[in-house]
Amino acid sequence: MIPANDKISAKQLFAAAFMCQLSPLIRRVPAKTAEAAGGSAWLSVLLAAAPLALMFFFAYLLVGSKGGRGLGSVLKDALGSVLGRIVLAVYAFWFVFLAAFILRSGADRFIGTIYPGSGPSLFVVVMVLACLPAAMGQLKALARSAMLFRPVLLAVMLVVFAFSLPDVRLAGMWQVTPSNELDVLYGSFSVFGPMSICVYLAFVTDQTEGEIKLSGLTGWLLAALAVAELLCVTTIGVFGAEMTARLRNPFFALVRDVTIFNAVERIDAIVVAMWVFSDFVLISLLLYTASKNLRMSFGIEPGEEKPKMTELGRGRWLTPVCAALALAAGLAMAKDAVSLEKFTEVIMPLLNFLFAVVLPPVVFVIGRLRRKI
Amino acid sequence: MKKLILILIIICMLPSLAGCEHAGTIYSNYREVEQLQLIRAVGVDLDGEDVRMTISSGERNEGGESMLLSRNAESLATAANSLQDYAAGQELFYAHTQYFLFGQAAAEQGIERYLDYIERSTTLPMGISLFVVRGEKAETLMTRSGDGQYDTGQSLTALKDVVNRRGDNHIFTCADTARALSENGAALICALRPATLEGSAFTSDTKAEVTAVPDGFGILRAGRLVGFVEPDEALCAAMLIDSGMSSIVLSDADGGLITLSLEGTDVWLEPTWNGDGSLGYVDVNVSARAKLIEVSQYHDTADHELLDLFGRLLSQELERRFTNLLSMENQFRADFLGLGDMLRDRDAQRFDAMPQSWNELLGNVDFHVNVSAKVGRTSDLKSSVSVDGEGEFGDSGQ
């Protein structure tokens, strides 16, 4: 039983989803779409809309629009008690691993932009320490923080886009020929991957109150795609496709050159630091969900009353354990940016595809065959 | 007990709040502003096998002193390290560097290693303006203009404003140049010439203070400087880049000078394709609108026929300049104007299906220049100033 006072609204859920996809979006979308589709990368974003819509509407149908049901309980119902619990635990470990990766790549963002030559350990440790209380606390507090952070980061992005506009050159971006249609399609995977991470929020839809409207989901998806499109067009418009593909952090390279009315410049340090908000929401939610899944897997009821932050009973000890595992994995994951690339390019996209795209439909089919959902 | 633990945790954290300067805080790269020496311009030259890096801290602040240093090293990064050793206790801070100047010899050897350095740097902005110093070393321009009242940073800032307003040249950033080189294999770079403040040409014997004046564009092919676009043709290149507007001087049949101000220009390309899909020729269409701003002898500028004549003269002059400019694309086999992109934007399918690629075609592309120019008079003067005493109101004032 979920504590009655730890419910979030659909709006808060969408705000959290928006915050969760920002970090992976910045890391992957401009460089990878430019690498695949060149100047036509903006089309890859549009092309990704269809599979993303399908995936989110599928998740929406799976958990139901009325709330009160999360993907965790769907898994248990569909796969049966034993297999369901095992899959829930596997998802929990995946979330811990994903949190470790976000921790490590967040540290890499700092090192690659404003703290060259630093080691990742300090950033990883500080981030875990910041996220642990949030993951131990209530979901509604985390969702409220997402509601607060969202307009801040949106405003920052809009300022960056607006002041980069004079340098944007759109020549060569509008021509799509049969020779690069496949490249555009391939580029759409780079948009689909980072945004698919939001499907994991289906594990907390049992904590939403009120109806999750289809129009709300559509609006959220369109807004997220608009941000991805602006990101693509602006970075490729300024640097060109080849150079964007070459840069490790094209968005932050863009920010480095933003000058506001010749009065304010070098806002990159502030903007990079602000992306901590996105990492904070995503990592905290992953740790929260991992702990919740493990509790469900072990059959531990969270209890109805609001727990104290320091209370470790009723399975709440699992959250610091998850955080410790994420910390250890984050520290051990990659010594430098080159080693991290293997995770960014191959391991994480493949695992994410498996857990976000492949497993939910498989669960659905098994559940239907067993007549459990 | 809990309160005691909390107090202990807070006490443990206190050492990390000891200040910004000292070790043990989380501010690992914090610097006091007073310790920073902001570098405004960087010059790069070749000295034998070495890179010679010159830095200028720009204008002198009240009570402060500007810094001008040069050092040799195997690479730019090691030269920067070496300069730091001689910075008299101040930390050289490159985050606000605005200008990067290449000596001609360094640019001829290739600038890609320097672009790579800027791209990789976490401090240097990609929007840094690039220049090549024509016929001289960057160090010469920077040290000579740093001697007196004007320094490199100041003169380049003034020059940038003037060029942007006047439109007869264009200052490219590192991002622009790197993008053009990676997409077209060629790029333009703003060329500067050292000149004395009195206006005389700079020579090695010149003792007077110098400043930087724009002198066309350098042409980069595969990252190396291969030639220059002269100022006359640079205006046409600027028209292709951002509808350059500037003044242009023509001479009429009687030897009189007519100065026009270009108010607006449009340039568009029209490819003609052969039956086998190859490129036949390229029409380069130019439409220019200009206003009369100065004439050296009396003209009735209300006379439309005369304005049409000026229009024809302007067309001829622009046609000559554009033809020269476009012949350089063939001469250097370098698409420094990005014409390939413009043609591809017209018809990507046909462009991609050409039997020979655009780069293979360069050298033999047939450009046909068509210019149509219209000249109007400035609205506040119906005719030019008459000095022969035979004007309509010539005697009335006596």
Image (tube, coloured by chain):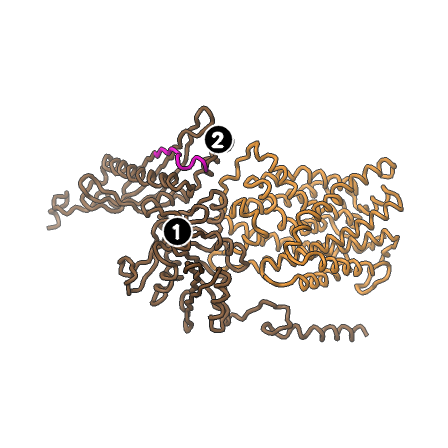
Chain colours: A orange, B brown
Residue of label 1: B190
Q: Amino acid at mark 1?
A: Cys
- For this rendering, which residue is in front, B106 or A295? B106
Same chain? Circles 1 and 2: yes
Residue A361's place in the image compared with A304, above or below, is above
Chain ID for label 1? B
Q: Is residue A320 magenta?
A: no
Residue of label 2: B354
Q: Residue at x 11, y 47 (%)?
A: B395
Residue B87's place in the image compared with A355, above or below, is below
Start-end of magenta stretch: B359-369
Chain ID for label 2? B
The spot of residue B70 in percent (x, y) is: 42, 65
Distance from the alpha carbon under mark 1 to that under mark 2: 33 Å
Q: Residue at x 75, y 43 (%)?
A: A354
The spot of residue A31 in percent (x, y) is: 59, 47
Based on the displayed image, in which of its 4 quarters is residue B339 positioned?
top left
Pick whichever of labels 1 and 2 is earlier in the sequence.
1
**Disc ID at residue A204:** none
